[in-house]
Image (cartoon, grey):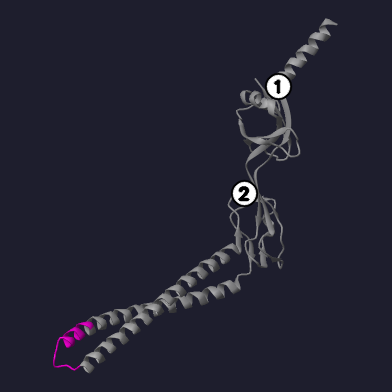
Amino acid sequence: MKLFFLVLVSTFVLATESQIYYAKAEAKVEYVVKSEVNGKVLFVNKKFEGKNSTGEVLIRIDNFTDKVNLQNAKNRLKFSKTILSSTNQSLKNFREILRLKKANLQKINSLRSRSRFEKDIEKINLLNIENSYQQVSQQKQQTLSTISDLEGQIKILQDNIKKKTIKVSKGLYIYSIDIQKDDFVSVGRAILKIFDLSKAKLTIFVALEKFDEIKKQKIYIDGKLTNYKIDKIWKVADSQNISSYKVEILIDAPKVFSKLKKIQFQH
């Protein structure tokens, strides 16, 4: 009877010293890639499903119209810059003419031999040139505005063209390609699911009163002592696991993901 009691006591002590949890080894990060553009799917490289990316093109969306619009915008930009150059030269010429006209008017105004009519004619000529100068200045501002708009259009078109050729960084695991050739995709449609398998994460749910305790304890995985540490602790209780708080542990990538792991915290 005493022996049975001692076994119960020792089991109770061990249970209080060791916190045991179970969690699946999941990918460190899961990405859902959504389309940022609209268009018809011309090419899908399905052979990379279930494999690590090598950086090759996975999806290509029709960009013909974008390329045509891009070339037109570039041609218009080139023409607008030519007009701007010509306008700048005209303004330079006008400034020189104005300088000469003003100097000439001052000389005429100082001569008593010139009639009032002649002086008024020179002043009118000066005012006409000043008005022409202002008109050309306004044309310059309009041209500058056109150039700015075209440069913005070109950047948008270049960005759209880039986004229509979809690649994934080397090493990421391509879980699924969720579109087919000839599909029409719109902005926001999920097209790829990708995992970062460089590390794995174990997610457990711990009662608040256990936090201080497990922070001081060592982590055992499947019965083996590890050097792993708690990576994250959520400060808000989980919506499904009521009164429990999410805790995440990062571990080295296992050979097989999604396998259940036994996690123990003990001194």
Category of crowding for the residue at label 2, using alpha-carbon neighbours closer than 10 angstroms: few (below 14), some (14–19), many (at least 20)? many
Which one is earlier in the sequence, the residue at label 2 or at label 1? 1
Q: Residues within 10 Å of mark 1 (few under 14, many from 20)?
A: some
Name the residue rendered at 69%, 34% in the picture: 245
Give the residue number, with chain letter if any, for mark 1: 18
Q: Position of residue 241 (x, y in %)?
A: 75, 36
Quarter of the image with the C terminus in it: top right
Amino acid tagged 1? Ser
**Total marks drawn?**
2
Q: Which residue is mark 2?
A: 172
Asked whether, in this view, residue 217 is left or right of residue 77, the answer is right
* x then y, percent, for residue 107: 16, 85
In 3D space, how far apart are the residues under numbered discs 2 and 1 (Cα atoms)?
36 Å
Task: Out of 2 and 177, give the one closest to the viewer.
Answer: 2
Q: Which residues are magenta?
A: 102-115
Q: Position of residue 106 (x, y in %)?
A: 19, 83
| Callout 2: SS | loop
Which residue is painted at 57% across and 66% down in the image? 161
Quadrant of the image occupied by residue 213: top right
The answer to whether 240 is drawn above or below residue 83 in the figure is above
**Marks 2 and 1: which is nearer the front?**
1
User: Split into 4 quadrants, where in the image is the N terminus?
Assistant: top right
**Residue displayed at 26% across by 83% down:** 97
Whether residue 107 appears in magenta in the rendering, the answer is yes
Q: Is residue 140 left or right of residue 121?
A: right
Q: Quadrant of residue 188?
A: bottom right
Q: 183 above or below 236?
A: below
Badge 1 element: loop
